[in-house]
Amino acid sequence: MTLRAVHFVAIVLAALALVPAGAHLFALPNKIGMGQGQYFTAQSVYSGWALLGLVLIGALIANGTLAMLVRDEMAPFRFALAATICFTLSLIVFFVWVFPANQATQNWTAVPNDWRALRVRWEYGHAVSAILCFAALCATTLSALSRE
């Protein structure tokens, strides 16, 4: 029963991690061409979203735990490991592309000269993260479905 519970938690956390990432991805086409004032106003709606990073970390831990638990089952292990790798890559993308933009703009409350370049990094960083979170959700679900 423990393994089923870990699978359930891993799937739920993967789905929850996809929610904010997907929101960023689907907002990108509407935001990428905005002028400075509009863009900074739009960015203000994300105040407090940093706490959602805990879900991503939880999904990473749950999938890592899942991979350890199913390590003797080839297909479930590979899918759980793939999900773990996707969540790890998503965090790397965040800290390489998104976080520096947040820092440089003081969470989009200060306007540096290169705000347009920072916007591109921020928006496309979140887009890549959304794709990785979706792949992780698929892999986590396939891990559960591939068990005999």
Image: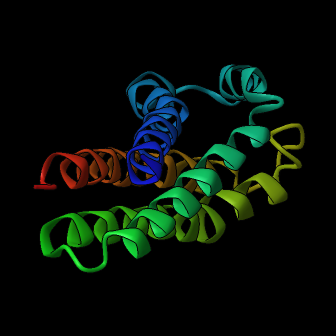
Question: Residue extending furthest bottom?
Answer: 72
Say above or below: 47 vs 38: below
- Asked whether residue 33 appears in the rendered view, the answer is no
Question: Residue extending furthest front?
Answer: 1
Task: Looking at the picture, tell me which residue is in the foreground, 98 or 89.
Answer: 89
Task: Looking at the picture, tell me which residue is in the foreground, 58 or 116.
Answer: 58
Compared across the picture, whether 68 is left or right of 72 comes to: right
Compared across the picture, whether 142 is left or right of 124 comes to: left
Q: Quadrant of residue 97?
A: bottom right
Q: Quadrant of residue 41?
A: top right
Residue depicted at x 44% and y 21%: 30
Q: How was the colour assigned to the protein in this rendering? A: rainbow
Say above or below: 127 vs 22: below
Compared across the picture, whether 83 is left or right of 21 comes to: left
In percent of width and height, residue 56 lies at: 59, 50
- Asked whether residue 46 appears in the rendered view, the answer is yes
In percent of width and height, residue 35 lies at: 61, 27
Residue depicted at x 89% and y 49%: 106
Say above or below: 117 vs 7: below
Residue depicted at x 53% and y 61%: 60
Compared across the picture, whether 121 is left or right of 144 comes to: right
In percent of width and height, residue 27 lies at: 46, 25
Residue depicted at x 35% and y 61%: 83
Q: Quadrant of residue 34?
A: top right
Count of numbered circles on the image: 0
In percent of width and height, residue 120 lies at: 51, 51
The quarter of the rendered structure image containing the C terminus is: bottom left
